[in-house]
Image (cartoon, coloured by chain):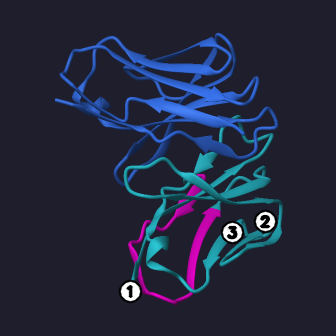
Amino acid sequence: SQTIHQWPATLVQPVGSPLSLECTVEGTSNPNLYWYRQAAGRGLQLLFYSVGIGQISSEVPQNLSASRPQDRQFILSSKKLLLSDSGFYLCAWSSRENTEAFFGQGTRLTVV
Amino acid sequence: QKEVEQDPGPLSVPEGAIVSLNCTYSNSAFQYFMWYRQYSRKGPELLMYTYSSGNKEDGRFTAQVDKSSKYISLFIRDSQPSDSATYLCAMWGAEAGTALIFGKGTTLSVSS
């Protein structure tokens, strides 16, 4: 069966510090991978998606970037965090048929 | 007009009640419709998945899709306190883009 791992679960970082969140998927090949951010009262905002290694599409211009160095690994990064980057970050995967998506348990990021 | 509209609630019902959760959408290209349940501080989990119009039943849960009205519903029968969560609708279509589009979620509270 497929599983998705996302870490860390909680992170507190100072403004201006770098960020690296990692997500890996097991039990499937060539998944579509996604990074979402969920802010209170604002629903799920798609940040990045990837249909293959090195292929990243950005949905919202901002202080974040994403990379996919391996087929089942997706990384969310920032060089300098802003207060507004605080939120609940979710990684997700879907099959190539791109129907339902499956989520990791999320990372709650607080920028102080 | 947002692509997917969902009343955020909160919705409070007594145990045993029938709950109706709804979303409307504007993009007629959506073909796949999903409901996710999200407990506090956790990632969303897929609850129901429906293709095109019609009904789908799974235990106490029934999903309905009316493409002519661009309206989807989730019914929960005999609601339980463990059903207290945020419910997000999501949808996708091959001509609507790569990633799922989510509603903002409805917060449900079932009291015993």
Q: Which residues are magenta?
A: B3-24
| Labels 3 and 1 share a subunit | yes
- The CA span between labels 2 and 3 is 6 Å
Left or right of A40, for residue A76:
right
| Position in image of residue A44 (x %, y %) | 48, 45
State the mark number for residue B100: none
In the rendered image, the quadrant that contains the N terminus of chain A is: top right
Which-is-in-front pick, marks 1 and 2? 1
Q: Earlier in the sequence, mark 3 or mark 1?
A: 3
| Position in image of residue B103 (x %, y %) | 54, 56
Query: In the rendered view, would you say B100 is above or below A89?
Result: below
Q: Earlier in the sequence, mark 1 or mark 2?
A: 2
Residue toward you, B17 or A48: B17
**Residue under numbered circle 3:** B71
Left or right of B69, for residue B90:
left
Q: Colour of chain A?
A: blue
Q: Chain of mark 3?
A: B
- The CA span between labels 1 and 2 is 35 Å
**Residue under numbered circle 2:** B67
Q: Chain of mark 1?
A: B
Residue A34 appears in which quarter of the rendering?
top right
Query: In the rendered view, would you say B56 is above or below B45?
Result: below
Three-letter amino acid code of the residue under disc 1: Ser
